[in-house]
Protein backbone atom coordinates (compact mmCIF):
# COMPACT_ATOMS: atom_id res chain seq x y z
CA UNK A 1 0.00 0.00 0.00
CA UNK A 2 2.76 2.44 0.98
CA UNK A 3 4.63 1.72 -2.25
CA UNK A 4 1.52 2.72 -4.23
CA UNK A 5 0.84 6.08 -2.56
CA UNK A 6 4.44 7.23 -2.08
CA UNK A 7 7.42 5.49 -3.66
CA UNK A 8 9.83 8.04 -2.18
CA UNK A 9 8.54 7.58 1.40
CA UNK A 10 8.52 3.79 0.94
CA UNK A 11 12.25 4.03 0.23
CA UNK A 12 13.03 6.39 3.10
CA UNK A 13 11.12 4.33 5.68
CA UNK A 14 13.44 1.38 4.99
CA UNK A 15 16.05 3.28 7.00
CA UNK A 16 14.13 2.60 10.24
CA UNK A 17 14.26 -0.44 12.53
CA UNK A 18 11.36 -2.96 12.20
CA UNK A 19 9.20 -1.83 15.15
CA UNK A 20 9.44 1.88 14.41
CA UNK A 21 9.09 1.24 10.67
CA UNK A 22 5.71 -0.42 11.22
CA UNK A 23 4.40 2.41 13.43
CA UNK A 24 5.63 5.13 11.06
CA UNK A 25 4.13 3.29 8.06
CA UNK A 26 0.70 3.19 9.75
CA UNK A 27 1.09 6.84 10.83
CA UNK A 28 1.91 7.88 7.26
CA UNK A 29 -1.00 5.95 5.71
CA UNK A 30 -3.49 7.37 8.23
CA UNK A 31 -2.34 10.91 7.44
CA UNK A 32 -2.20 10.18 3.71
CA UNK A 33 -5.85 9.09 3.88
CA UNK A 34 -6.77 12.22 5.83
CA UNK A 35 -4.91 14.31 3.24
CA UNK A 36 -6.80 12.52 0.43
CA UNK A 37 -10.09 13.70 1.94
CA UNK A 38 -8.74 17.27 2.24
CA UNK A 39 -7.33 17.24 -1.32
CA UNK A 40 -10.49 15.99 -3.05
CA UNK A 41 -12.08 19.21 -4.29
CA UNK A 42 -15.14 17.29 -5.54
CA UNK A 43 -16.32 16.56 -1.96
CA UNK A 44 -18.83 19.20 -0.77
CA UNK A 45 -17.66 21.06 2.33
CA UNK A 46 -20.71 19.98 4.33
CA UNK A 47 -19.55 16.37 3.83
CA UNK A 48 -15.81 17.00 4.06
CA UNK A 49 -15.66 19.07 7.27
CA UNK A 50 -17.17 16.49 9.68
CA UNK A 51 -14.99 13.73 8.19
CA UNK A 52 -11.82 15.79 8.73
CA UNK A 53 -12.81 16.62 12.31
CA UNK A 54 -13.79 13.04 13.20
CA UNK A 55 -11.07 11.17 11.30
CA UNK A 56 -9.16 10.39 14.51
CA UNK A 57 -12.20 8.38 15.64
CA UNK A 58 -12.57 6.52 12.35
CA UNK A 59 -9.08 5.02 12.62
CA UNK A 60 -10.36 2.87 15.51
CA UNK A 61 -13.18 1.46 13.34
CA UNK A 62 -12.14 -1.12 10.70
CA UNK A 63 -15.67 -1.01 9.26
CA UNK A 64 -15.50 2.71 8.41
CA UNK A 65 -15.35 3.43 4.67
CA UNK A 66 -15.34 6.64 2.65
CA UNK A 67 -14.40 6.36 -1.00
CA UNK A 68 -12.74 9.45 -2.48
CA UNK A 69 -9.58 10.60 -4.21
CA UNK A 70 -8.22 9.22 -7.47
CA UNK A 71 -5.95 6.44 -8.67
CA UNK A 72 -3.79 4.96 -5.90
CA UNK A 73 -5.27 7.30 -3.29
CA UNK A 74 -8.72 5.89 -3.99
CA UNK A 75 -7.27 2.39 -3.57
CA UNK A 76 -5.97 3.49 -0.16
CA UNK A 77 -9.38 4.86 0.86
CA UNK A 78 -11.22 1.78 -0.42
CA UNK A 79 -8.86 -0.45 1.60
CA UNK A 80 -8.65 1.72 4.71
CA UNK A 81 -9.85 -1.26 6.77
CA UNK A 82 -6.34 -2.71 6.40
CA UNK A 83 -4.77 0.49 7.76
CA UNK A 84 -7.21 0.60 10.68
CA UNK A 85 -6.52 -3.07 11.49
CA UNK A 86 -2.76 -2.44 11.47
CA UNK A 87 -3.26 0.64 13.67
CA UNK A 88 -5.19 -1.41 16.25
CA UNK A 89 -2.28 -3.87 16.41
CA UNK A 90 0.21 -1.16 17.45
CA UNK A 91 1.22 -0.58 21.06
CA UNK A 92 -0.87 1.90 23.05
CA UNK A 93 1.91 4.52 23.09
CA UNK A 94 2.04 4.54 19.30
CA UNK A 95 -1.77 4.59 19.01
CA UNK A 96 -2.15 7.59 21.31
CA UNK A 97 0.53 9.57 19.46
CA UNK A 98 -1.10 8.85 16.08
CA UNK A 99 -4.60 9.62 17.40
CA UNK A 100 -3.53 12.96 18.88
CA UNK A 101 -1.80 14.16 15.71
CA UNK A 102 -4.67 12.97 13.49
CA UNK A 103 -7.20 14.83 15.67
CA UNK A 104 -5.23 18.09 15.61
CA UNK A 105 -4.44 17.85 11.91
CA UNK A 106 -8.04 17.12 10.91
CA UNK A 107 -9.27 20.11 12.92
CA UNK A 108 -6.65 22.37 11.33
CA UNK A 109 -7.45 21.17 7.81
CA UNK A 110 -11.15 21.81 8.46
CA UNK A 111 -10.35 25.36 9.56
CA UNK A 112 -8.47 26.13 6.34
CA UNK A 113 -11.07 24.58 4.02
CA UNK A 114 -13.12 27.72 4.66
CA UNK A 115 -10.23 30.17 5.16
CA UNK A 116 -7.80 31.50 2.55
CA UNK A 117 -4.10 31.80 3.33
CA UNK A 118 -3.85 35.58 3.62
CA UNK A 119 -0.83 36.33 5.81
CA UNK A 120 2.52 34.66 6.37
CA UNK A 121 1.23 33.77 9.85
CA UNK A 122 -1.73 31.99 8.19
CA UNK A 123 0.73 30.18 5.93
CA UNK A 124 2.81 29.05 8.91
CA UNK A 125 -0.34 27.95 10.74
CA UNK A 126 -1.65 25.94 7.77
CA UNK A 127 1.74 24.29 7.26
CA UNK A 128 1.85 23.52 10.99
CA UNK A 129 -1.45 21.66 10.77
CA UNK A 130 -0.61 19.62 7.68
CA UNK A 131 3.13 19.05 8.22
CA UNK A 132 4.50 20.51 11.46
CA UNK A 133 2.23 18.12 13.34
CA UNK A 134 3.79 15.25 11.38
CA UNK A 135 7.10 16.37 12.88
CA UNK A 136 5.52 16.34 16.35
CA UNK A 137 4.17 12.84 15.75
CA UNK A 138 7.45 11.43 14.46
CA UNK A 139 9.30 12.89 17.45
CA UNK A 140 6.79 11.20 19.77
CA UNK A 141 7.15 7.88 17.94
CA UNK A 142 10.96 8.13 18.14
CA UNK A 143 10.67 8.85 21.86
CA UNK A 144 8.24 5.94 22.39
CA UNK A 145 10.89 3.50 21.13
CA UNK A 146 13.34 4.73 23.76
CA UNK A 147 15.97 5.57 21.12
CA UNK A 148 15.62 9.36 21.26
CA UNK A 149 14.99 12.20 23.69
CA UNK A 150 11.73 14.05 22.97
CA UNK A 151 12.67 16.90 20.62
CA UNK A 152 11.43 20.45 21.35
CA UNK A 153 8.17 21.14 19.52
CA UNK A 154 9.49 24.18 17.66
CA UNK A 155 12.25 22.09 16.07
CA UNK A 156 9.85 19.25 15.18
CA UNK A 157 7.53 21.86 13.66
CA UNK A 158 10.31 23.33 11.50
CA UNK A 159 11.17 19.88 10.14
CA UNK A 160 7.64 19.62 8.77
CA UNK A 161 7.32 23.24 7.66
CA UNK A 162 10.47 23.15 5.56
CA UNK A 163 9.28 20.06 3.66
CA UNK A 164 5.73 21.37 3.25
CA UNK A 165 6.73 24.83 2.06
CA UNK A 166 9.10 23.28 -0.48
CA UNK A 167 6.26 21.13 -1.82
CA UNK A 168 3.88 24.11 -1.98
CA UNK A 169 6.45 26.08 -3.97
CA UNK A 170 7.21 23.20 -6.35
CA UNK A 171 3.52 22.30 -6.86
CA UNK A 172 2.28 25.82 -7.74
CA UNK A 173 1.12 24.96 -11.25
CA UNK A 174 -0.55 21.66 -10.31
CA UNK A 175 -2.47 23.32 -7.46
CA UNK A 176 -3.53 26.41 -9.40
CA UNK A 177 -4.83 24.22 -12.28
CA UNK A 178 -6.75 21.85 -9.97
CA UNK A 179 -10.20 20.82 -11.27
CA UNK A 180 -13.02 21.57 -10.35
CA UNK A 181 -11.45 24.46 -8.41
CA UNK A 182 -7.92 25.64 -7.82
CA UNK A 183 -6.10 25.22 -4.52
CA UNK A 184 -4.23 28.28 -3.27
CA UNK A 185 -1.58 27.95 -0.57
CA UNK A 186 0.84 30.77 -1.40
CA UNK A 187 0.10 33.59 1.09
CA UNK A 188 -1.48 36.75 -0.29
CA UNK A 189 0.95 38.79 1.84
CA UNK A 190 3.75 37.58 -0.46
CA UNK A 191 2.16 37.22 -3.91
CA UNK A 192 0.13 40.45 -3.78
CA UNK A 193 3.41 42.39 -3.91
CA UNK A 194 3.88 41.11 -7.46
CA UNK A 195 0.48 40.36 -9.09
CA UNK A 196 -3.23 41.06 -8.60
CA UNK A 197 -4.29 37.39 -8.58
CA UNK A 198 -2.26 34.30 -7.67
CA UNK A 199 -3.05 32.61 -10.99
CA UNK A 200 -1.47 35.56 -12.84
CA UNK A 201 1.97 34.16 -11.95
CA UNK A 202 1.58 31.39 -14.52
CA UNK A 203 1.18 33.74 -17.49
CA UNK A 204 4.27 34.36 -19.59
CA UNK A 205 3.83 38.14 -19.61
CA UNK A 206 4.32 38.08 -15.82
CA UNK A 207 7.47 35.93 -15.86
CA UNK A 208 9.74 38.52 -14.26
CA UNK A 209 7.31 39.23 -11.40
CA UNK A 210 6.63 35.51 -11.02
CA UNK A 211 10.31 34.71 -10.48
CA UNK A 212 10.64 37.54 -7.95
CA UNK A 213 7.65 36.14 -6.06
CA UNK A 214 9.08 32.62 -6.29
CA UNK A 215 12.38 33.77 -4.79
CA UNK A 216 10.46 35.44 -1.96
CA UNK A 217 8.70 32.12 -1.26
CA UNK A 218 11.95 30.12 -1.32
CA UNK A 219 13.61 32.60 1.04
CA UNK A 220 10.67 32.19 3.42
CA UNK A 221 11.07 28.39 3.36
CA UNK A 222 14.80 28.61 4.10
CA UNK A 223 14.02 30.31 7.44
CA UNK A 224 13.43 26.80 8.82
CA UNK A 225 16.70 25.25 7.61
CA UNK A 226 18.72 26.06 10.75
CA UNK A 227 16.10 24.49 13.03
CA UNK A 228 16.14 21.37 10.85
CA UNK A 229 19.91 21.04 11.21
CA UNK A 230 19.62 21.50 14.98
CA UNK A 231 16.90 18.83 15.19
CA UNK A 232 18.92 16.30 13.19
CA UNK A 233 22.16 17.01 15.06
CA UNK A 234 20.46 15.86 18.29
CA UNK A 235 19.37 12.46 16.92
CA UNK A 236 21.27 9.56 18.49
CA UNK A 237 20.20 6.64 16.32
CA UNK A 238 21.80 6.50 12.87
CA UNK A 239 18.74 4.93 11.22
CA UNK A 240 16.50 7.69 12.60
CA UNK A 241 19.00 10.26 11.35
CA UNK A 242 19.00 8.83 7.81
CA UNK A 243 15.19 8.65 7.81
CA UNK A 244 15.01 12.37 8.68
CA UNK A 245 17.98 13.58 6.64
CA UNK A 246 17.08 12.14 3.22
CA UNK A 247 13.82 14.15 2.78
CA UNK A 248 15.51 17.30 4.12
CA UNK A 249 18.35 16.93 1.61
CA UNK A 250 15.78 16.46 -1.16
CA UNK A 251 13.95 19.59 0.04
CA UNK A 252 17.03 21.80 0.13
CA UNK A 253 17.95 20.51 -3.34
CA UNK A 254 14.44 21.29 -4.59
CA UNK A 255 14.70 24.83 -3.18
CA UNK A 256 18.00 25.25 -5.03
CA UNK A 257 16.45 24.05 -8.31
CA UNK A 258 13.33 26.20 -7.90
CA UNK A 259 15.14 29.42 -6.98
CA UNK A 260 15.12 31.89 -9.88
CA UNK A 261 13.61 29.20 -12.13
CA UNK A 262 10.62 30.26 -14.25
CA UNK A 263 9.99 26.57 -15.08
CA UNK A 264 8.12 26.30 -11.76
CA UNK A 265 5.32 28.17 -13.56
CA UNK A 266 5.54 26.09 -16.74
CA UNK A 267 5.65 22.47 -15.55
CA UNK A 268 6.99 20.03 -12.97
CA UNK A 269 10.35 20.81 -11.36
CA UNK A 270 11.82 17.87 -9.47
CA UNK A 271 15.11 16.93 -7.89
CA UNK A 272 16.09 13.41 -8.91
CA UNK A 273 17.09 11.01 -6.15
CA UNK A 274 20.27 10.23 -8.09
CA UNK A 275 21.38 13.81 -7.43
CA UNK A 276 21.99 12.80 -3.81
CA UNK A 277 25.01 10.83 -4.96
CA UNK A 278 26.45 13.68 -6.99
Image (cartoon, grey):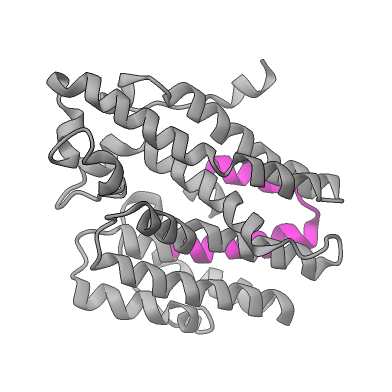
**Location of residue 190 in the rendering, given as x and y in whole percent from the top left corner:** 30, 42
**Location of residue 131 in the rendering, given as x and y in whole percent from the top left corner:** 50, 56
Residue projecting furthest to the top? 278
In this view, the residue in front, 262 or 51, is 262
Residue at 50% across, 63% down = 31
The answer to whether one can see residue 194 in this image is: yes
To which quarter of the image does residue 199 belong?
A: top left
**Location of residue 236 in the rendering, given as x and y in whole percent from the top left corner:** 87, 51
**Location of residue 143 in the rendering, given as x and y in whole percent from the top left corner:** 78, 66
In this view, the residue in front, 178 or 220, is 220
Residue 37: in magenta span: no
Q: Is residue 85 left or right of residue 260?
A: right
The answer to whether one can see residue 67 in this image is: no
- The count of marks equals 0
Residue at 18% across, 70% down = 44
- Tell me the chief SS of the magenta region: helix
Above/below status of 211 relative to 91: above
Residue at 19% across, 29% down = 202
In this view, the residue in front, 36 or 62, is 36
To which quarter of the image does residue 55 belong?
A: bottom left
Residue at 34% across, 30% down = 214
Q: Is residue 243 left or right of residue 120?
A: right
Q: Quadrant of the C terminus?
A: top right
| Residue range highlighted in magenta | 7-33
To which quarter of the image does residue 191 belong?
A: top left
Residue 22: in magenta span: yes
In this view, the residue in front, 203 or 106, is 203
Amino acid sequence: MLQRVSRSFALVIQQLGPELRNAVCVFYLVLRALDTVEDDTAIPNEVKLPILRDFYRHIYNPDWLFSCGANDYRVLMDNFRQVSTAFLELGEGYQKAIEEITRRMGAGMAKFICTEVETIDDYDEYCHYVAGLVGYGLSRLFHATGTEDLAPDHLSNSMGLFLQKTNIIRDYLEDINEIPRCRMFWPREIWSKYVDKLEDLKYEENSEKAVQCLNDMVTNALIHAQDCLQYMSALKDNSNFRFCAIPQIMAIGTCAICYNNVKVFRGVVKMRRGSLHG
